[in-house]
Each structure stands twice: as structure tokens, then as C-alpha cells.
Amino acid sequence: DGGITQSPKYLFRKEGQNVTLSCEQNLNHDAMYWYRQDPGQGLRLIYYSQIVNDFQKGDIAEGYSVSREKKESFPLTVTSAQKNPTAFYLCASGGPNEKLFFGSGTQLSVL
Amino acid sequence: QKEVEQNSGPLSVPEGAIASLNCTYSDRGSQSFFWYRQYSGKSPELIMFIYSNGDKEDGRFTAQLNKASQYVSLLIRDSQPSDSATYLCAVNSVRTGTASKLTFGTGTRLQVTL
């Protein structure tokens, strides 16, 4: 099956803890993205990557970090510096036709 | 600050009627426009895209674009209860290499009643 796999589906973070959200795609897309969605709000771009070993900050990158060591993988780390991490996190990938396809999302909550 | 505005709703339409969802955007240089459907607790799913002024039809869905008025809309004909969801408008005004930095609206919640 072609698609984007996010894990885990639910994640809980303790105070001061870093947590990592996984995103894997087998669509052979160059570009990958991380968005955050809060209740009643639109999607906000955290980070994006156009190619392996390259990534750029989005609109709300503070408190987050990413890596792109493989074309298929784009993990997101929510660091302890992110003081309000509770949100629905969405990973997406896109080909040259500008269409973005999303994974199933990870709901992150604070204990 | 690029903005995409949508009425949050809920927009309530009876089954079989036409649902009309609207979106305005602030960046006149925007080139590409997308509609995503999002069911509660699920991820967005691309249902329509449009690049040129005018109408684009795909099954029960029609996207309409008016760049002069900075307005894009989505019409859903013969609305079904399964169409009940939040519809997100997304606009791409910046294309950086292979990346598309979409700006999303907050979405309009559609309720199709029996």
C-alpha cells in the first residue's frame, strides 16, 4: 500500500520531556511537511523538507526539531522548550504537482 | 501575513441540496487552490484543486475560482450525510523548489441533515 504512516496515534508527554513523532512515506515524494492543528484552527506549518539532509522552518518552528536522513522518513521531535505541545500533529508529503497527502496524525497530550 | 478566511459554520443543508462553501484569500499572487475534507479526529483528504479562473467539476464537486475577487468556492451537489465534515481551503502562493507552502483556512463545518 502506498501512503504515509504516522506513529504513534496517541502520545503523552511529561513535563521537561522530549518526544519524537514518526513519519514514513513510500510515495517517492521529495517534499515532506509537519503541520500542527489546534481545535477550531487551521493547520500551521512547523517544518518542511525538500530533499534529504535539508529542511526549513515553517511559521511555528520554535520548540520543535526535525531531521531528514532518508527520503522516506521525516521525524519530528517536540522538545521541552515547546510549552504548549498539546495538539494534533499531521505529517504530509507532496510531489511536483503541489498536492499534499497527509498521514493519519498523532494526538499529543501533556500529562 | 498571508491569510485564508472561511466561515466556521456550521453550515446546515438538507440531504439532496447543494452546499456552498466559500473562501477568500489575501495574497493576490496566489496560484494554486485546494479543498480538503476532514472528518472529526481524522486527517485532511484532498478532494479538489483548481489553478485557473472559472469552474472545475469532479463528480458531485465543483470548485470555482475568481482571482480578481480573491475568492474560491466549493459546491457539493446532492449533499449526503456522509458529506458532513469540516472543509479546509488551502492556498499556495509560495513555491520553493519542490516544496509547496500551503496556507490553510480554519475550515467550515458542514452538516447534512436527513
Image (cartoon, rainbow, N blue to C red):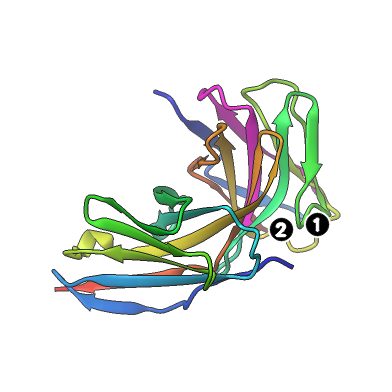
Dot 2, how many residues are within 10 Å of its Cα: few (below 14), some (14-19), or many (20+)?
many
| Marking on residue B2 | none
Task: Tell me whether circle 2 and circle 1 mark residues in contact (CB < 8 Å).
Answer: yes
Residue B103 lies, in percent from the top left, at 62, 58
The residue under label 1 is which amino acid type? Gln
Disc 2 versus disc 1: distance between alpha carbons?
Answer: 6 Å
Q: Mark 1 lies on which chain?
A: A
Q: Residue at x 42, y 72 (%)?
A: B22
Going by the image, does A20 lie left or right of B69? right
Marks counted in the figure total 2
Quarter of the N terminus of chain A within the rendering: top left
Quarter of the C terminus of chain A within the rendering: bottom right
Label 2: which secondary element = loop
Q: Mark 2 lies on which chain?
A: A
| Residue at which label 2 appears | A85
Q: Which residue is drawn at 40% across and 65% down?
A: B86
Per the picture, the main secondary structure of the magenta-coloured stretch is strand
* Looking at the image, residue B35 lies above or below residue A64: below
Say whether residue B14 is visible: yes
Label 1: which secondary element = loop
Start-end of magenta stretch: A17-36
* Looking at the image, residue A62 lies above or below residue A101: below
The residue under label 2 is which amino acid type? Pro
Q: Residue at x 26, y 63 (%)?
A: B76
Are discs 2 and 1 both within one chain?
yes
The part of the image, by quadrant, that contains residue A39 is bottom right
| Residue at which label 1 appears | A82
* Looking at the image, residue B75 lies above or below residue A65: below
Residue B109 lies, in percent from the top left, at 39, 71
